[in-house]
């Protein structure tokens, strides 16, 4: 099967590394069917890609990756995970690309690992999952990673992880037992990652690194729908420097369709950002490939825009 006869690159497709995953606590990605797919980098994954017409997956480690480890452990395990993923890529180079795992608890080492992964292993950028031991990615301690990403001209994908425990306690504890999804993909992931995106703009990171490229999944974690109001409200009270939120978002961010196959949400995103800023993703295996195939195949958009979303934009952004 193909998707409207187009080449397809899926940009947020996850896997698990044995050594790194052994450090995880909690319930992220623990069901037997999810684990079977997350640890598969061959026959099962390729069969489901072929069935749905996905030509290339850009692989990234599942949450929380190395973001909750101590610095020394993060550096060791991230490097090992990237090396093992590289060996897997060599078995199917025409079907897989990769985003690096970064040891963000040690930012200078994370910047160096990003450079090694890009220049020596051929990775296309990196993915960071949620807060690093409670600290948002906009914090200046992480700016060396941003500086290196800009110099290498590769994107950083800001991906959700479970919210800060204090947020879970304050916002979700009344409902988390009956509705556990409220802390993750149903709501908590969106709030945490959209906040990370807003903070990136407010931090001044894009003033320091004007060509830094940031990717957000799930059609931008709701930000395209809210961008006008955010921009207006940040500037209406006066008393400070103007915040060019809308300008920064539409210059420095790309968004993907991962796990959000909503036509109204996509059209809103296209109207706000343009089709050039939207990248096809599934969020496999947390979301299956076929619903995405059926959705984007039947969308009433131009063939030119469909081609951009399915692979053209990814080719340009990731230099594939």
Image (cartoon, rainbow, N blue to C red):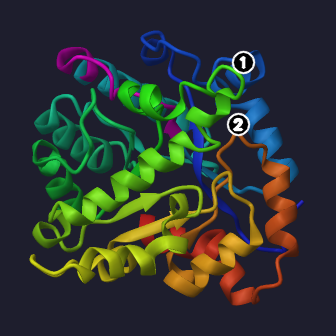
Question: Tag 2 or tag 1, which sits nearer the N-term?
Answer: 1
**Picture residue at 63% right of the left edge, 28% below the top:** 175
Which element is circle 1 on? loop
Question: Measured along the vertical axis of the image, is residue 306 above or below residue 286?
Answer: below
Residue 17 image point, x, y percent: 50, 21
Q: Tell me where the magenta segment starts and ends, as one range.
A: 60-74
Query: Is 244 colored magenta in this rendering?
Result: no
Question: Which quadrant of the figure has residue 307?
Answer: bottom right
**Picture residue at 48% right of the left edge, 35% below the top:** 171
Asked if residue 320 can be seen in this view, the reply is no
Residue 136 image point, x, y percent: 27, 42
Residue tagged 2: 285
Q: Nearer the viewer, residue 39 or 136?
A: 136
Question: Which quadrant of the figure has residue 253?
Answer: bottom left
Q: Is residue 294 found left or right of 302 in the rendered image?
A: right
Residue 57 image point, x, y percent: 62, 49
Which quadrant holds the N terminus?
bottom right
Residue 31: mark in rendering: 1
Q: Are marks 1 and 2 in contact (CB under 8 Å)?
A: no
Question: Which quadrant of the figure has residue 230?
Answer: bottom left
**Picture residue at 16% right of the left edge, 44% below the top:** 142
Query: Is 67 colored magenta in this rendering?
Result: yes
Q: CA distance from mark 1 to mark 2?
A: 11 Å
Could you tell me what secondary structure mostly forms the magenta stretch?
loop
**Picture residue at 88% right of the left edge, 74% below the top:** 298
- Dot 2: within a 10 Å radius of its alpha carbon, few (fewer than 14), some, or many (20 or more) residues? many
Which element is circle 2 on? loop
């Amino acid at each position: 099967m193909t998707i409207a006869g187009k080449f397809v690159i899926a940009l947020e497709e996850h896997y698990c590394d044995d050594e790194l995953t052994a450090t995880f606590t909690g319930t992220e990605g623990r069901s037997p069917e999810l684990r079977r797919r997350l640890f598969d980098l061959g026959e099962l994954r390729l069969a489901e890609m072929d069935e749905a017409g996905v030509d290339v997956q850009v692989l990234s480690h599942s949450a929380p990756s190395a973001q909750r480890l101590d610095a020394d452990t993060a550096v060791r395990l991230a490097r090992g995970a990237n090396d093992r993923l590289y060996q897997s890529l060599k078995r199917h180079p025409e079907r897989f690309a990769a985003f690096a795992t970064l040891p963000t608890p040690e930012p200078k080492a994370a910047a160096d690992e990003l450079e090694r992964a890009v220049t020596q292993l051929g990775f296309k950028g990196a993915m960071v999952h949620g807060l690093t031991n409670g600290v948002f990615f906009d914090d200046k301690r992480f700016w060396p990673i941003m500086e290196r990403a800009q110099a290498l001209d590769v994107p950083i994908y800001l991906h959700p992880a479970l919210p800060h425990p204090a947020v879970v306690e304050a916002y979700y504890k009344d409902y988390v037992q009956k509705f556990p999804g409220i802390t993750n993909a149903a709501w908590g992931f969106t709030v945490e990652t959209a906040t990370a995106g807003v903070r990136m703009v407010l931090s001044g990171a894009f003033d320091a690194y004007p060509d830094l490229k940031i990717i957000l999944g799930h059609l931008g974690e709701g930000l395209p729908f809210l961008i006008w109001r955010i921009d207006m409200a940040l500037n209406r009270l006066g008393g400070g420097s103007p915040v060019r939120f809308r300008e920064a978002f539409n210059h420095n961010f790309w968004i993907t369709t991962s796990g959000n196959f909503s036509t109204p949400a996509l059209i809103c995103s296209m109207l706000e950002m343009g089709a050039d800023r939207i990248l096809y993703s599934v969020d496999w295996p947390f979301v299956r490939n076929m619903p995405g195939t059926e959705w984007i195949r039947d969308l009433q958009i131009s063939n030119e825009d469909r081609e951009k979303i399915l692979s053209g934009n990814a080719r340009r952004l990731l230099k594939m």
